[in-house]
Amino acid sequence: MSTRLGNGLLGLVVAGLLSGCAAISPESRITVAGAPNVWKASKEAQAGIDSRWLEKIGGGELRGLVDAALTNNEDIKAAAARVDRAASEARIAGAGRMPSLGFGGNAQRDKRSFIGFPIAGNGGTYAPSSLSEQFGVNLNAAWEVDVWGRAKAGQEAAIADAQARQYEYEAASVSLAGQVTKAWLALGEANEQVTLAETAVAAASALADAVRERFDRAITDGGGTASQVRLTEAERASRRAALAQRKQERERVLRQLEILLGKYPTGNLAAEARLPAFPGATPAGLPSELLQRRPDILAAERNLASSGRRLKQTKLARFPSLNLTTSGGVASEAVNDLLSSDGLIWALGGGLTQPIFEGGRIRGEINSAEAGEREDIAVLRKTVLDAFGEVEQALVAESFLSERERAGKQAAALADEAAVRAGEEYSAGTGDVLTLIDATTFQIDSASQYAAIRRMRLENRVDLHLALGGDFRAGN
């Protein structure tokens, strides 16, 4: 290849590499959303957000379940695949800004017959013919010069899209951690409810047996009531039905947890979970931290950044485009002559195209991009508004649930004392069976409600962590 042609190709490639600035991630547009200065429902705005909430709620057991879910859950796998696909699309978008270079070769053999020029011979005439061969190799390069930055804007939009998919993956991870935690808490409550229901069945059975014994003695002694026997038997049957319902609920929660962990719902998961103690003080943070931490907000912001670059890209489509092409190679009638410079061929060209009439296509694309940007602004603001609302609601609920837990604990303690006294009075003959049944029923129901309130308060703490961004990080 001649020096002249080589310099032309080299100059084309170098110009492509040096043209414009490298595509980068678009600047943040989070200021469009706005943010308050303090949380209205809590004075604890400077404490900093708890970064170890999983361990503080459920220790190593819960953390192990969450890690297993993040490894095996199919929704998380799908989110990860979307991240990889978006990253590949960003690389594809960047490829359009670079020159393309291709190498090719060809071989051709032709035979032509000259029918109009017959030649006599061999007892007749025949048409002469010729046989030719052609071999060649060539190198082609093409480049659309990004004079106005249209391709760069498209590439930066693709980069923002890839970042949005990454934040969506993180949001899915945080959400999955919350779902696993809530399922684990529900399993803990279900186990306590089953234990309470078993205790209630045992107490009802003991009472029914005692009343039956008294009734049998009363018949022999000429006294006693059959209604008390029927009443205590009915109470025992009712408690057995309640136990079956509690066990059914536990099986449902077990299978739900197994699905979150990416397992087939067989109900074989270890079911020894119990409701943990409340982790303590409320985590808090500044509203500005929420904008920097919640992956759904960050994903919405990146979508907005992408739409801004898409709008710029469509507007720049009205400007002319510059295309440069070059090719060079060798052609010969013999393969062994391909290395010779005698058959050198080359071409260098350029073109400038200015859109004049597109039937309204460019104007329509600009209008569509402007509408998309307005939509993404609204989505970002709505996402931020929802996030602030979730934090405020969780902070408000915290105080009410705390009061309900204290009252529930007191009610359960008083119900225990009442049931003990009713049993003593019945055994001493100074109390009646109805009072004992009512006291026992209230004892079990109070304990059941107390367990439910504890779970509700723990779930609200999970909601608060998720609303604040959770600070769940895989591998922490």
Image: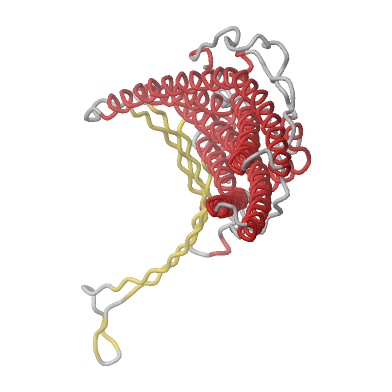
Relative height, residue 78 to residue 398 (above, below): below
Residue 272 visible to an observer of this rendering: yes
Q: Viewer-proximal residue, 79 or 124?
A: 79
| Quarter-of-image position of residue 340 | bottom right
| Quarter-of-image position of residue 61 | top right
Query: Who's the residue at 51% across and 11% down the image?
Result: 34
Residue 179 visible to an observer of this rendering: no
In the image, is 429 to the left or to the right of 113?
A: right
Residue found at the far right of this picture: 60
Give x and y (percent) for residue 403. 63, 20
Give x and y (percent) for residue 453. 62, 31
Q: Viewer-proximal residue, 324 or 133?
A: 324
In the image, is 52 to the left or to the right of 153?
A: right
Residue found at the far bottom of this picture: 123
How is the rendered protein coloured?
A: secondary structure
Give x and y (percent) for residue 185. 65, 40
Residue found at the far top of this picture: 37
Query: Which of the image's four quarters has the C terminus?
Result: top right
Q: Viewer-proximal residue, 294 or 431?
A: 431
Q: Viewer-proximal residue, 365 or 137?
A: 365
Count the marks: 0
Query: Who's the residue at 70% across and 46% down the image?
Result: 65
Relative height, residue 194 to residue 90 (above, below): below
Query: Who's the residue at 45% across and 42% down the image?
Result: 347
Give x and y (percent) for residue 28. 55, 18
Relative height, residue 234 to residue 41 (above, below): below
Query: Who's the residue at 73% across and 49% down the image?
Result: 272
